[in-house]
Image (cartoon, helix red, strand yellow):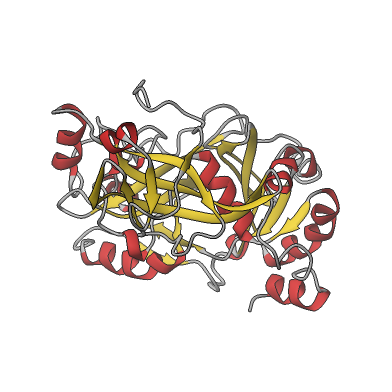
Amino acid sequence: MNEFQQYLSDSGARKAGFAAPPTLALVQDGFVAAIHEASLIAANGLDAVKFLHNQLTNDVQHLAEPLAAGVGKAQLAAYCSPKGRLLTTMLMWQSADTVWLQLPAELAAPIQKRLSMYVLRDKVKLQAVAGNPDFPMQQVTLGLGGQAAGTALANWFPHLPPHAYSLCENAHGTLIRVGDAFGAARYLWLCSEATAAAAWPQLAGALAPLDERAWDLSAIHAGVPQLSLPTQEKFVPQMINFELIGGVNFKKGCYPGQEIVARSQYLGTLKRRMMLAKVAATAVGVVPGAEIFSSSDPAQPCGTVVNAQATQDEGLPCWHLLTEIKLAARQAGSVHLGSADGPPLQWLELPYALDAIDV
C-alpha cells in the first residue's frame, strides 16, 4: 500500500461512494477516482523509440512532437501477436527520454516480459513504474470525468489539454485528456503520492469521490475498449473499433501482425464491430469474454462481451457493456447474453460513427 492508498484508508475516504456501483448521473456530473487496475511501464534508452515503433500498432517516432505550445501528445496503441490478434491495448506518451505505456495491470508483467524478449541488441530498458523510486511523479493515477471535472482541476492545471489525446505537464504531474464520454472530457492525472493526498480533499469536495468502476463506466461510454485475460487474442484491432479511435497507424510500417491487420482493413468487408449496449441487472455472467447470441442463429455465439460495468440507468439497475458482434447478427434479430434465451441486449449509441454502417 503506497502513501496515497494509506491516506485513503486512514481518512475513511474509501467509504463514501465505494459500496454501490456508480450511477450514470454521478459519472455524468463529475467524479474523481483512484485508478489501480492500470499499470505503467517506462521505456528508456537510445533505441526505445525505434524498438517500440517496430512492436506497436501506432507511430512512436513522432510521439514527442508537441501539438502546440505547452501541449503534448498521447496515443492509443496495441500490441499484437504474429497472427494480428490483440495481446493488449494501451495508452502511450513520451516525456523527455521516456516513453510511457499504460496498460491493464493484469497484463502488464507478461507484456513487459514478452517485449523484453525482442530487445536483442537494442539499447532499451523496460521498467515497471509502481513502487520504483526512479519515477516519483508517476506513482498515483487519478481518473476524472463529467461536466465538472475541468473546473475542479483548475487549481493545479490552469491550462487544460484542449482535446482528446493531448496532455499538459507541470510541477503537479502529467494531465492527459483521453476519449470524451457523455459529451464531457475525461482526464488521467499522474502525480506523486504526496500530491494526490494533498489534492484529494479538494477534488472530493468538488466532484463525487468514487472508485474506478466509475472510470470503467466512462471508458465504456467513450467507446474505448480495455483488453483483459479472458479477451486476449480474441480480436484483431478493427473488431473492437481500435482504428476508429486512433489506435492503429496504417502508414507506419511493420510490427507483429501488421500484414493481417492491414489485410483486414483493405481487403474485403469488415464483418464484425464493437457496439455499446445495456442489459438488465438480473443478468448473470456479465463479464469480459462472455458470449452473446442472436435469435436469428441461436446455435452459435455471434459475439463477445469486451467490457462491462454495473450502473443505474434512469433509476433502474443494469449493466452497460461494450460487445464485439457480427454485423449481420446485429441487423438480423434480437441479441441475448449467454444464450438465445438469455436476457436481451438494448443498443446504445457510441460517441463515434461505425464507418457509416447502417445499424
Q: Position of residue 127 (x, y in %)?
A: 41, 67
Q: Is residue 341 left or right of residue 6?
A: left
Indicate the quadrant containing the N terminus: top left, top right, bottom left or bottom right: bottom right
Q: Is residue 74 left or right of residue 288?
A: right
Q: Is residue 67 left or right of residue 331?
A: right
Question: Number of marks in the image?
Answer: 0
**The quadrant where residue 229 appears:** bottom left
Q: Position of residue 164 (x, y in %)?
A: 55, 34
Q: Is residue 40 left or right of residue 257?
A: right
Q: Position of residue 52 (x, y in %)?
A: 30, 50
Q: Is residue 110 above or below residue 286?
A: below
Which residue in the rendered view is the most extreme toward the front?
341
Indicate the quadrant containing the C terminus: top left, top right, bottom left or bottom right: top left
Give whichever of 26, 161 is nearer the camera.
26
Q: Residue at x 62, y 35 (%)?
A: 182
Give whichever of 162, 120 is nearer the camera.
162
Q: Position of residue 241 (x, y in %)?
A: 36, 37
